[in-house]
């Protein structure tokens, strides 16, 4: 019976906030050994035993631990082993306290897993030798040296009780780890009665797990003496089984009470976190630390991971920085979208200027519900070790209140979003993903106002369409060259178009052509690219670069719509929608324009496109005066006025015309129009 004096000694001599290690990962490694051993017992000792740890114990995270895990585990194993051999000397409580002295600097959950790891090594070794003994001469020799029994069938009651106790110890250990490491204790008041009561239960539970480990060690040693038939049927087997079953029953009762207490603490924490999150908007913050600590709670561990360096870090690394929270499923983005996002943030020409001013933190969610599948966990671990950003170290530990807040307040559903937190922790943009896809680091500080500013007075130019997808395209943009991007899935049309362009170039037309297919790129496009010499001669885009081109266009349309624009009131959005929604893949199309910022582009399709190109002799002489786009428009509409505002007019509603910063273009000639207010009686 554990008395009050022993509890007081434990509380006085062992600091619950001492050194710690990754208890959860280590318990998984311990559980792997326990599971395989239990499988052998459950299958009447006939299954093959493979003592392969789920996680290599040498890779388990250690923080502030003065010695390697293997060293401290060996010391614990040796100390328990010696105490079991000298069990007649001194009382059990004294031997347990001497073990506590060895692990006094570790946190309570770490104490448990270290002792369980020491036992698991002996437990796994025992079952491995027993299982391999009939077929392996080396295992048989070692088993003889260790005096292990030949026949375990008469020992089933003792072995069954041992297996039950091991399982119960693992269940209690999991409760302790959840309380000590998983739950964000800093969100509860220090004097909270539920926490205090739960801590007392944890101390008792740790004591009984260690006491049970002593008993299990002793039972394994006792089995070595039962290798003669005249000893097997002794009463000691029944007594041993009764002792183990009693410990399992006591630990089971503790586990039930502890689980209820941990659940109560969990509910209390969730309510507390939810209330604090809801009050964030009404509070004034001097930095982003309070907000980030609410989102990524930590108690003695670092909640974030630097993916590129594969090191853990705390939220203090994000202080005074703009934080971009990339929220998505565990698969993050499609590969092409991910490549574009990396390019626009890490490989952007302006990244060197702003790289120390902001950080991206990836927050992955499971695909459905709150439970993580093994596939999702594997996907997250692979990506988080490959990305150039930060990520949540263990996203499944996120508070359910935080997850609910993100979904409700930041409108996260299934599609990835990037929520911008300014240096004070205030939400500056509920989704900056599209603006980053379009402008990259030029969108700094990634606020909603910056997105509106970037679109202000922005026409649909070649510079906007092509962006920084390809260095050669950037060079063309810089030199102000005429560019034609075109698409089709019709090889004969591509041949006809290519022949026409070749003839025009021979006549002096300076025009660079780029094949981009259609918005819905299929294998047919890839086959055309590999088989068509015309495309290979004109296109400077790989299939992946084509995908990036269309991804940016889709981001532009979403960005415009998010700002409240409509195709009827915004010419840029209308042109983007027309390009993205073209469905007739047999009829070719082209967008032609120069790279001058002040110049617009012209979109031509089908027979109109071929007719304009085929009659170059009629309009080519105006190129020097009006430019390529102006000349083409003038040819299509003789009444088109190239310079200055046009003389066309049309009426729009006050809601459409009152949008600040929008450029109204003429639907007839596509020239910028002046705004006048007309009042109707």
Image (cartoon, helix red, strand yellow):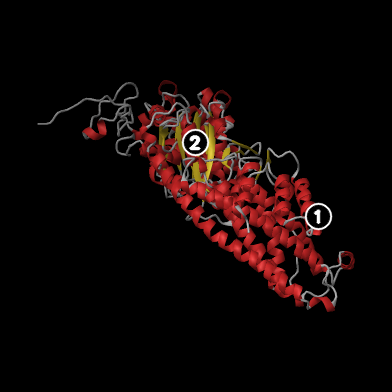
Q: Is residue 191 above or below residue 597?
A: below
Label 2, secondary structure: give it: helix
Residue 370 coordinates in the image, percent (x, y):
49, 54
Q: Is 26 or 254 nearer to us in this picture?
A: 254
- Give the quarter of the image for residue 375: bottom right
Q: Residue at x 37, y 31 (%)?
A: 633
Residue 218 coordinates in the image, percent (x, y):
76, 62
Q: Is 657 or 514 nearer to us in this picture?
A: 657
> In the drawing, does residue 603 fall left or right of residue 50?
left
Q: Is residue 411 visible?
A: yes
Residue 440 coordinates in the image, percent (x, y):
51, 31
C-alpha gap between disc 1 and disc 2: 48 Å
Residue 184 coordinates in the image, percent (x, y):
52, 44
User: Which mark identifies residue 82?
Assistant: 1
Q: Residue at x 41, y 26 (%)?
A: 599
Q: Is 117 or 587 nearer to us in this picture?
A: 117
Q: Is 558 or 351 nearer to us in this picture?
A: 351
- Label 2: few (<14), some or many (≥20) within 10 Å? some
- Label 1: few (<14), some or many (≥20) within 10 Å? few
> In the drawing, does residue 565 fall left or right of residue 190?
left
Nearer the camera: disc 1 or disc 2:
1
User: Which mark identifies residue 292?
Assistant: 2
- Quadrant that contains the C terminus: top left
Label 1, secondary structure: give it: helix
- Quadrant that contains the N terminus: bottom right
User: Which mark identifies residue 386?
Assistant: none
């Amino acid at each position: 019976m554990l008395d009050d004096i022993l509890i007081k000694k434990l509380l006085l001599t062992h600091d619950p906030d001492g050194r710690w290690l990754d208890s959860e990962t280590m318990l998984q490694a311990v559980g792997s050994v326990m599971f395989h051993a239990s499988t052998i017992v459950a299958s009447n000792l006939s299954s093959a035993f493979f003592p392969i740890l789920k996680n290599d114990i040498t890779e388990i995270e250690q923080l502030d631990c003065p010695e390697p895990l293997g060293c401290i585990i060996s010391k614990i194993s040796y100390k328990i082993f010696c105490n079991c051999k000298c069990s007649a000397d001194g009382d059990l409580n004294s031997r347990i306290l001497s073990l506590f002295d060895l692990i006094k600097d570790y946190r309570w959950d770490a104490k448990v897993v270290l002792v369980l790891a020491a036992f698991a090594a002996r437990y796994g070794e025992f079952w491995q030798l027993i299982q391999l003994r009939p077929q392996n001469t080396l295992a048989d020799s070692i088993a003889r040296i260790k005096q292990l029994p030949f026949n375990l069938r008469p020992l089933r009651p003792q072995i069954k009780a041992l297996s039950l106790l091991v399982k119960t110890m693992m269940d209690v250990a999991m409760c302790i780890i959840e309380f000590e490491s998983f739950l964000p204790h800093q969100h509860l008041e220090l004097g909270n009665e539920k926490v205090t009561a739960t801590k007392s239960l944890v101390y008792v539970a740790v004591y009984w797990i260690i006491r049970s480990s002593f008993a299990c060690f002793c039972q394994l040693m006792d089995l070595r003496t039962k290798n003669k038939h005249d000893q097997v049927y002794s009463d000691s087997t029944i007594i041993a089984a009764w002792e183990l079953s009693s410990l399992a029953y006591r630990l089971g009762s503790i586990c039930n009470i502890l689980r209820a207490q941990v659940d109560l603490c969990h509910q209390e924490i969730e309510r507390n976190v939810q209330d604090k999150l809801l009050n964030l908007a009404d509070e004034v913050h001097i930095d982003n630390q309070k907000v980030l600590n609410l989102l990524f709670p930590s108690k003695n561990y670092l909640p974030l991971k630097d993916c590129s360096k594969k090191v853990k870090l705390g939220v203090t690394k994000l202080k005074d920085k703009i934080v971009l929270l990339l929220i998505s499923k565990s698969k993050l983005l499609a590969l092409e979208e991910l490549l574009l996002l990396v390019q626009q943030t890490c490989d952007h020409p302006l990244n060197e200027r702003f790289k120390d001013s902001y950080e991206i933190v990836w927050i992955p969610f499971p695909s459905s519900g709150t439970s993580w599948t093994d596939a999702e966990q594997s996907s997250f671990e692979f990506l988080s070790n490959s990305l150039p950003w930060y990520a949540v170290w263990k996203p499944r530990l996120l508070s359910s209140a935080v997850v609910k807040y993100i979904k409700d307040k930041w409108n996260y559903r299934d599609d990835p979003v990037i929520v911008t937190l300014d240096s004070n922790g205030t939400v500056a943009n509920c989704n900056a993903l599209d603006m980053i896809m379009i402008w990259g680091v030029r969108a700094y500080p990634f606020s909603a106002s910056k997105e509106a500013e970037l679109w202000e007075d922005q026409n649909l130019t070649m510079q906007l369409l092509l962006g920084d997808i390809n260095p050669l395209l950037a060079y063309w943009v810089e030199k102000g060259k005429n560019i034609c991007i075109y698409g089709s899935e019709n090889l004969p049309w591509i041949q006809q178009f290519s022949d026409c362009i070749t003839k025009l170039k021979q006549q002096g037309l300076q025009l660079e052509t780029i094949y981009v297919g259609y918005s819905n790129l299929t294998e047919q496009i890839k086959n055309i690219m590999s088989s068509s010499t015309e495309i290979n001669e004109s296109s400077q885009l790989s299939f992946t670069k084509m995908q990036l081109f269309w991804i940016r266009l889709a981001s532009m349309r979403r960005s415009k719509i998010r700002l409240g624009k409509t195709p009827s009131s915004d010419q840029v959005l209308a042109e983007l929608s027309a390009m993205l929604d073209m469905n007739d893949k047999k009829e070719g199309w082209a967008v032609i324009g120069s790279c001058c910022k002040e110049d617009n582009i012209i979109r031509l399709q089908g027979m109109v496109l071929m007719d304009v190109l085929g009659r170059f002799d009629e309009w080519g002489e105006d190129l020097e005066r009006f430019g390529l786009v102006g000349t083409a428009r003038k040819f299509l509409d003789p009444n088109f006025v190239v310079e200055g505002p046009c003389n066309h007019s049309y009426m729009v509603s006050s809601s459409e015309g009152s949008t600040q910063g929008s450029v109204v273009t003429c639907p007839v000639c596509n020239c910028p129009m002046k705004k006048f207010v007309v009042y109707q009686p």
